[in-house]
Amino acid sequence: VVGNAGFIVPDAGFLEGLREITKDNGALLVFDEVMTGFRIAYGGAQEKFGVTPDLTTLGKVIGGGLPVGAYGGRRDIMGMVAPAGPVYQAGTLSGNPLAMTAGIKTLELLQKPGTYEQLDRITKKLSEGLLKIAKEAGHAACGGQISGMFGLFFAAGPVHNYDDAKKSDLTKFGRFHRGMLEHGIYLAPSQFEAGFTSLAHTEEDVDRTLAAAREVMASI
């Protein structure tokens, strides 16, 4: 799932095709799950779409809001990392106790029953509401969500890739962002950034956001 060209879901069969091609050619398949890991499912995009990569990179959620990064993969590949293997990797903040504590607590919260259902419900209400309001105000718009990740393009769509995303009305997005900010709602400051919800967001937060969006969409 793309997050730095806006929110873009992979076409059906795309990830499966990558897995097949990499296997056929003896290449490694690496999933960047820094945004999607533990967010769109506890097992990330690979759980959501049923495709297992050889290596995975993680960040953001696993630090509970603190700086952190991690990687993992097949046993034979990870066995190449020191001290078991010749590839040395270390960093000043590796294993930072504060980040690890925050990360562990976050993962514990995500394991509670109903957590992802809650995220999906809140985010779906927000995403569908924004899209409906935009279209009712006469704007070309498209978008969607998976669990706590969502996006809205000021474009008729559909958006399958960055080239499609670049057709969005960036001027209109800028006006929308400024208008929402004046209503006390801080969204991602670029048309090409995905949005995220969290367990801290409530139905009331979504209602307030949609009410503000209705006013702003009517004025831009």
Image (spheres, helix red, strand yellow):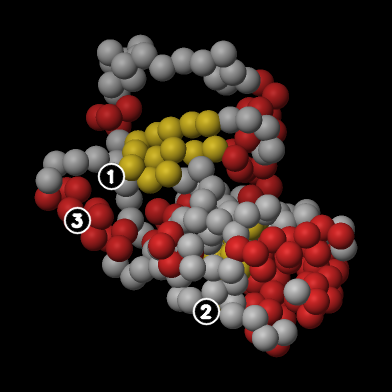
Nearer to the camera, 175 or 121:
175
Q: Is residue 6 above or below residue 102?
A: below
| Sooner in the amino-acid sequence: mark 1 or mark 3 | 3
Amino acid type assigned to the residue bearing label 3 in the image: Glu
Q: Helix, strand, or loop for circle 3?
A: helix
Q: Is residue 92 visible?
A: yes
What's under tag 2, amino acid-wise?
Answer: Ala
Measured as percent of width and height from the top left, residue 141 is found at 59, 77
How dense is the environment of label 3, judged by Cα within 10 Å: few (below 14), some, or many (20 and up)?
few
| Residue nearest the observer in this picture, 30 or 115 | 30
**Which residue carries the number 3 mark?**
20
Q: Nearer the viewer, mark 2 or mark 1?
A: 2
Of the numbered discs 2 and 3, the one sitting upstream in the chain is 3
Q: Residue at x 58, y 54 (%)?
A: 193
Query: Circle 1 sits on which residue?
Result: 29
In the image: residue 69, left or right of residue 179 = left
Q: Are marks 2 and 3 in contact (CB under 8 Å)?
A: no
The alpha-carbon separation of the residues under discs 2 and 1 comes to 33 Å
Disc 1 element: loop
Q: Is residue 154 above or below residue 178?
A: below
